[in-house]
Amino acid sequence: MNDFNPPVPDPAQVAVIPSDAAEHSRKTARMALVARLVLGDLLALFIGFSLAEAVRGDIWLKLGDVSLLYIVLPLFLVLATNAGAYSLPAQSRYAESARNVIGALGQTLLALFGILFAVQQGEDISRVGMGVVFLVSLAAMLFFRLLNAFWVRRALGGVLVDELVILDGVANPGAEARFMIDARKNGLEPDLNNPAMLERFSRICDCYDRVLVACPAERQGVWATLLRTVDAEAELIVGQQQNFKVIGLSSIGDLRTLVVSRGSLTLIDRIKKRLFDLAIAVPALLFLGPLMIAVAIAIKLDSRGPVLFRQPRVGRNNVIFEILKFRSMRQELGDRDGTRSTGRDDDRISRVGRFIRRTSIDELPQLLNVIKGDMSIVGPRPHALGSTAENRLFWEISHRYWERHLLKPGITGLAQVRGFRGATEKTSDFTDRLTSDLEYLSGWRLWRDVAILAATLKVLVHPNAY
């Protein structure tokens, strides 16, 4: 088979990025669909219990004075989520949706029997009533999900995924997608040494679920690396497999594609991580408020300048944001670009600054970054663009550096609890952190965030914190 290398396109035939792409994103439609599915399932359970109570009486559907409905509802939602009843395949395919919800309802029934057995209350529950509950609820769930399937087909044309095809110096090989752009007309060049270009690329791709690139064979390797920095399913349209890492095969129409990335978290995982962030950040900010006020006063009395230090850092999808920290250096000696790592006896650090850095108190204002949505409680630590190791910028040491930004940066992370913090004087100081960050990204679980946060409490005061 010949290499995929079609002719150069006519620029007039390929549009620049649509200005309203975000407004018409399928992500919003999917979130609305998840809400409809959840509400439909809850309504189905309510109908099931209502009919069962009409048939058998509510006294036979209670555990003590509590209706079984209030036990079944949260139990079902947790099991349905884990069973994929609200996943993208379940949203787009009725057969998948029906199979997953049947499995979730069956697991709920078994779990409920287990609870009743554990509390030795099973003899007080009507078997007929429970049979009516689950049969009616299942019928209603399947009906509501069928209505949702019709809505997806009619309102969205059966398409729940936004696809963007990027053409770099080649003609459209026949791919059909809602959005298609020319890389050169949109100022996209796969230059991994240009942070501004990476940020632009991430902003363009941010509202898409699937990004595909068609390019000459000699540029496929660098595009594959760039695509791994995008939080979406990323693929190359190719004629044959090239010499770079792929994780799967796919297609768009009749064209074969190589999957180089599948993004980071699912929608459900994003919701869980965001709720975890807010559940920690809001109470922590309220509890630590008096301490933060006292530190602010001490900083103001110790040296001239603002209380907070603001610095551009690389955030999720390589987009720059402004991190907040308590100012620990004298204002006239501050390093906004982060080109100089802080040393153990750094003469730029103020007296109060030395204490708050050693105790990690200087990081507390980042709780505001978390609430704002720029950061997470747990994630790869954000770096300044000028950060170096042995006089080399981080991305010059490894282009995989850009991949660590698929998730929001964190106040703490796996690298920090492993002791990789402080100045990056040697290349290994950087590569050790990068390895930990990529490991965290590849195996995210909510329980791991909890474990990392707990481990952070042990290293708040650390010999490398200066």
Image (cartoon, grey):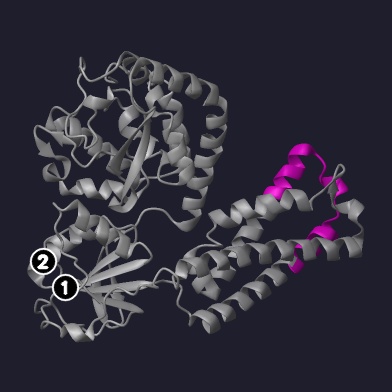
Q: In which quarter of the image is the N terminus?
A: bottom left
Residue 110 appears in the figure:
no
Task: Please name the predominant secondary structure of the magenta segment in the image.
Answer: helix
**Horizontal arrangement in the rendering, residue 208 relative to residue 314 (left or right):** right
Identify the residue position indicated by label 2 in the image: 219
From the image, tell me which residue sits under label 1: 168
Work out whether 188 lies above or below 178.
Answer: above
Q: Can residue 441 be seen in this view?
A: yes
Q: Give the range drawn in magenta.
A: 111-136
Q: In this view, does 276 lie to the left or right of 305?
A: right
Q: Which residue extends farthest front? A: 304
Looking at the image, which is closer to me, 175 or 288? 288
From the viewer's side, name the closer residue of 39 and 111. 39
Q: Which residue type carries mark 2?
A: Arg
Kind of element beneath mark 1: loop
10 Å crowding of disc 2: few (<14), some (14-19), many (20+):
few
Q: Where is residue 117 in the image (x, y as percent from the top left)?
A: 75, 42
Circle 1: is it few (<14), some (14-19), or many (20+) Cα within 10 Å?
many
Give the residue drawn at x 21%, y 82%: 172
Name the spot of residue 443 as percent of width and height, x first.
36, 45
Q: What residue type is labelled 1?
A: Asp
Label 1 close to label 2 by CB (< 8 Å):
yes
Q: How far apart are marks 1 and 2 (CA)?
A: 9 Å
**Looking at the image, which residue is at 50% across and 55% down?**
268
Quick check: is 231 in the magenta stretch? no
Q: Nearer the viewer, residue 216 or 138?
A: 216
